[in-house]
Image (cartoon, coloured by chain):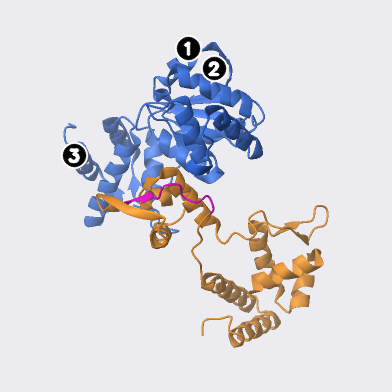
Chain colours: A blue, B orange
């Protein structure tokens, strides 16, 4: 398998949403991206942040507002010795950096923020005038809807869905295409559907199963993921599956 | 100097011109100039003049001075991920796995990343604390660009031969021989 970033339906929806979000630079807006673990939220956000030079920070459970500011500054390239030693100054530095170079800021695992830190994020968002993208698991909408001021600043939101059958087919063909012109490993819709059902659309599991399927197909010189190959691959990754 | 750089320098000097004029001034076949201009357009070094078909104007690329946008992306992916495999870096940046591994080796030699473990067959790396924001560039020998140019010239020559255009074909052959004599080729 080769390391391709497959533009699944979730990724397409995320990119389309970010296009709208980018137009909100200059306004205070919060974006909510939620979904169960294993649906590719972090991967999508990291890829987007890499390609479009966004600031990306991972939330920590024990964060205090000052610690959060320090981590945001680190992600912006301001390290320890250049960081202000007071909360107010750190806040102001983040705001001035956002104004100097306006781009979306992504906070991953934002469901760990808690109401107090969420208010700090809202303050930052209000003053910095760049969109803040909060990415988290299923509890994030609850957290954001609790505060009316946070809720009303939401300019876009999306929920990551399980990987669909067409995504499994596209993933299999693209990731196994070793060179230009090579059609990649074929997979029928029924087989993709079976993999999708057994994994519940979990990106990591699907990736591992397809990687196994590719190895088995190679060993058998097969050009397609047959039912037997798929079942053998599933058994290796999810042995408890029937 | 490579043909691409010569064409870019020409547009930098004259500002606005056509591909044909550039070809005449530099003594490079117009098909080759046209092909190089497409590369320069993609890289943002020239842009088409609105309302004047066939005219191009020099434009200081926003990526001017950058040695490699792929390395920029790789470095950004590595800084964001902090702990990563060559696979992750390639996936986020769009680089090939081989290139990603080569770049990570370069970063390790520079002391910017270190190997911290293994996940299956893949090594896990960690970027050092407080990594520089500026991309550390791995120097390329420029051979890749020359190779690309020779392949392009070869194809242009084939097209001219198939079209029965002897004049064009001999002009390209002469250009290739000149390049080889000047050391712009792989002897």
Residue with the mark numbered 2? A150
Whether residue B179 sits left or right of residue B112 in the image: it is right
Q: Residue furthest bottom?
A: B181
- Viewer-side residue, A200 vs B185: B185
Question: Which numbered disc covers residue A84?
Answer: none
Asked which secondary structure carries label 1, the reply is helix
Provide residue A29's location: percent of width, then percent of height: 59, 24
- How far apart are labels 1 and 2 at the CA level? 8 Å
Label drawn at residue A235: 3
Q: Residue at x 59, y 59 (%)?
A: B66
Q: Horizontally, is B119 left or right of A85 in the view?
A: left
Residue A111 percent across, percent down from the top left: 41, 23
| Residue at x 83% of width, y 57% of height | B52
Bin the neighbour count of mark 1 within 10 Å (Cα to Cα): few under 14, some 14-19, many 20 and up. few
Same chain for mark 2 and mark 3? The answer is: yes
Q: Which residue is mark 1?
A: A146
> Considering only order in the chain, which callout, 3 or 1, is on the residue closer to the N terminus?
1
Image quadrant of residue B27?
bottom right
Q: Position of residue B103 (x, y in %)?
A: 43, 60
Q: CA distance from mark 1 to mark 3?
A: 43 Å
Locate the N terminus of chain B and report the quarter of the image it occupies.
bottom right
* Label 1–label 2 contact, CB within 8 A: yes
Query: Which chain is home to disc 2?
Result: A
Depth check, front residue: B23 or B73: B73
Q: Is residue B173 magenta?
A: no
User: Magenta part of the protein: which range?
Assistant: B123-134
């Amino acid at each position: 398998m080769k390391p391709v970033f497959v533009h699944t339906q979730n990724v397409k929806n995320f990119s389309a949403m970010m296009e709208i979000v980018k137009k909100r630079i200059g306004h205070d807006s919060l974006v909510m991206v939620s979904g169960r673990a294993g649906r590719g939220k972090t991967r999508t956000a990291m890829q987007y942040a890499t390609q479009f030079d966004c600031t990306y920070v991972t939330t920590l459970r024990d964060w205090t507002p000052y610690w959060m500011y320090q981590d945001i500054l680190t992600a912006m390239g301001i390290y320890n010795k250049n960081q202000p030693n007071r909360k107010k100054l750190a806040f102001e530095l983040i705001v001035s950096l956002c104004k100097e170079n306006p781009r979306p800021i992504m906070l991953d695992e934002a469901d760990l923020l808690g109401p107090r830190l969420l208010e700090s994020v809202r303050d930052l968002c209000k003053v910095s005038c760049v969109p803040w993208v909060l990415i988290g698991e299923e509890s994030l909408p609850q957290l954001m809807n609790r505060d009316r001021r946070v809720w009303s600043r939401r300019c876009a939101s999306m929920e990551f869905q399980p990987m669909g059958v067409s995504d499994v087919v596209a993933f299999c063909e693209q990731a196994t295409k070793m060179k230009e012109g090579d059609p990649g490993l074929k997979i029928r819709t029924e087989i993709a559907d079976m993999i999708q059902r057994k994994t519940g659309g979990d990106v990591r599991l699907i990736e591992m199963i397809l990687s196994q399927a590719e190895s088995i197909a190679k060993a058998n010189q097969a050009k397609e993921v047959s039912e037997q190959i798929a079942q053998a691959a599933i058994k290796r990754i999810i042995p408890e599956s029937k | 100097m490579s043909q691409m750089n010569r064409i870019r320098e020409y547009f930098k000097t004259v500002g606005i011109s056509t591909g044909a004029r550039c070809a005449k001034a530099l003594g490079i076949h117009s098909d080759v100039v046209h092909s190089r201009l497409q590369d320069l357009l993609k890289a943002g070094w020239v842009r088409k003049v609105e309302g004047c078909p066939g005219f191009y104007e020099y434009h200081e690329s926003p990526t001017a001075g950058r040695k490699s946008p792929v390395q920029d992306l790789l470095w950004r992916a590595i800084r964001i991920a902090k702990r990563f495999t060559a696979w992750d870096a390639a996936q986020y940046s769009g680089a090939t796995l081989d290139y990603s591994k080569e770049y990570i080796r370069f970063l390790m030699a520079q002391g910017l990343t270190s190997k911290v473990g293994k996940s299956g067959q893949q090594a896990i790396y960690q970027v050092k604390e407080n990594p520089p924001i500026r991309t550390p560039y791995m120097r390329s020998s420029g051979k890749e660009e020359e190779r690309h140019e020779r392949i392009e010239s070869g194809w242009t020559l084939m097209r001219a031969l198939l079209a029965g255009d002897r004049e064009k074909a001999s002009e390209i052959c002469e250009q290739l021989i000149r390049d080889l004599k000047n050391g712009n080729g792989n002897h």
